[in-house]
Each structure stands twice: as C-alpha cells, then as structure tokens.
Amino acid sequence: MLLLLKRLIILTLAIFIAPCPGFAQKPPLFTVQVNSDNINVRADCTVSSEIICKADKGDRFEAVDQKYNWYRIRLPKETRVYIKQELLELSATCDPAAGADGKVRLPAKVAATNVNIRLNPSLESRIIGHADYGQAVEIIEKKEGWYAITPTDNCYGWIHGKFIQDAPEVTTPPETEEAIILEAPVLPQEEKLPEIKGSIRPYWSLFGSKGTHKLISEEGRTYILKGDQKLMDTFNQTEVVLSGEFLSDPEDKVPVFSVKSIKEIE
C-alpha cells in the first residue's frame, strides 16, 4: 500500500512538473514561404481562432508541425507577445517604458519555470508559447503589470496550407578573391639634358676665354665648351656626343655649352 502511494505521488508530480507538450520547442520540419499578401497567422488551426499577426508574400517561416491542412510555424520576431511582469528579471536598470515605440530592446531573464507567454496582456488571453527558467528574452515595453516581449523560439502560430509553399533554397554566391592590383609608384622622370654632336677641338681667344674647348658640329656650327679640361683633352679631334646645358641662348652665333658627360661616337 505504501509503495503504491509513493508511485502515485511521483506520477502526480511528473504530470505537473513536465513541460507543456504543446509548447515544447520542436525542431523545424522544413521552411515554408507565403505565396500571397495579408495572410492571417492564427492562434489555432481554425479560421475562427484569434489572429496573431499578418504575413505577406515572400515571408519565410519554420514549420514545426502539421494538422489537417494547417501548418504550425514559429512566430516572427516582429510580433509582440506578453509575459507577466513579476516573472521576468531585468538585466538593465533603464525604464522599459522607453521601448513603447518598439525600437528599444531591453534584456531580461525568465525568473520562473514553464512560464506562459500569451497573445495579449491578460490572464484570459490565449497561451501561444512558454519560456523556461533563466531563458533570455527581449522586452519591448511595460504595460499594466505585463511586459511585451519579442517571441521566443517556442512561440507558435498557425497558417493555412493554401497560402504557403516550400521555400526555395537560399543560395549564396561563392566568395571570390578580389584581384589585388599593385601599381608601381610613379617615379619622377629625369629631365633629358640637351645634347650636341660633333668634333672636340682646343679653343683659345684673344679677348678672354669663355671655355677651354670647342665643338664643331656636322653642320659647321661652333659651340664653346666649358667643363673638365683634362677630360675634354682626351677627346681632342674625336667625334662625340655631349650632354649638358646651355649657358647662353642656343640661338646665339657661338653659344656656350656646359659639358656634363661625353660619349664617343664609334
């Protein structure tokens, strides 16, 4: 008799403690996509049940169950659902009333076990999900002893099968490595020095020498040369190309040329 009583007590506790099978988080069966606009997502699998939210063409949902021609889906995060205020512990000190516009998300944790999540802020409102102790949630606003939160992963609604289809697989293009083009730095180009071509000869003048040598070009024009005298001595009577700069107007009758380099013409 005593053993039978103990088994009865254990069975009774298991019934009350076990999570509600209707709202235990389930793995998704597949992903569905809505094929029309302004479709009702309902609290149960009948056309007379309460409307939770609307869905539009192209919206995708995770389906976790099927009953007749209805599909049970996870609610979108844009939906507002409600939980009693005393069943949450705020993780921030700011006032949740600041989130009345839906733009503020305050972190909180569930402070009890198997807490009901309802469609509206009322104990008479339909239960559409649940949360477990310690589960993190996001508060949107505070409303008369209730918190509006974003749905947890085990908040569900129903949508009729004629408004959905299998969602096409989302493919992402393979990542491609961008070609790295290394541009060589643009170096300033050295300015090419003027050149003159001809035969180097010794030069002297009765009126004071402007240079030590002269160059007679193939055209018979004379240039007075200034530069390294010993170097130019080695090229006397030799056909050369001289690089340097003009010390006078190149159009003068006898221009003066400063020699920077000498190249013998072979």
Image (spheres, grey):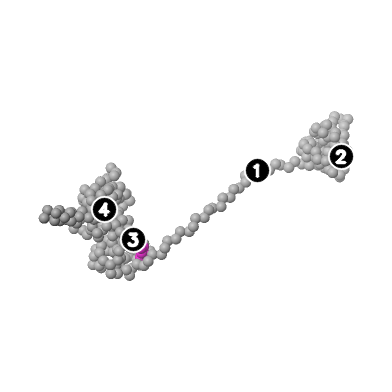
- Residue visible at 28% across and 69% down in the picture: 68
Mark 1 lies on residue: 187
Q: Can residue 126 be seen in this view?
A: yes
Q: For this rendering, which residue is in front, 66 or 178?
A: 66
Q: Earlier in the sequence, mark 1 or mark 3?
A: 3
**Mark 4: secondary structure:** strand
User: Which circle's residue, 1 or 4, is located before the other in the chain?
Assistant: 4
Local SS, label 3: loop
Disc 3 marks a residue whose amino acid type is Pro
Rounded to the nearest angstrom, the CA distance separating label 1 from label 4 is: 68 Å
Left or right side of 132 for 167 = right
Q: Which of marks 1 and 3 is in front?
A: 3
The kind of residue on which mark 2 rests is Thr
Q: Which mark is residue 131?
A: 4
Give how far apart the Cα atoms at labels 3 and 4 are.
Answer: 18 Å
| Closer-to-camera residue (18/188) | 18
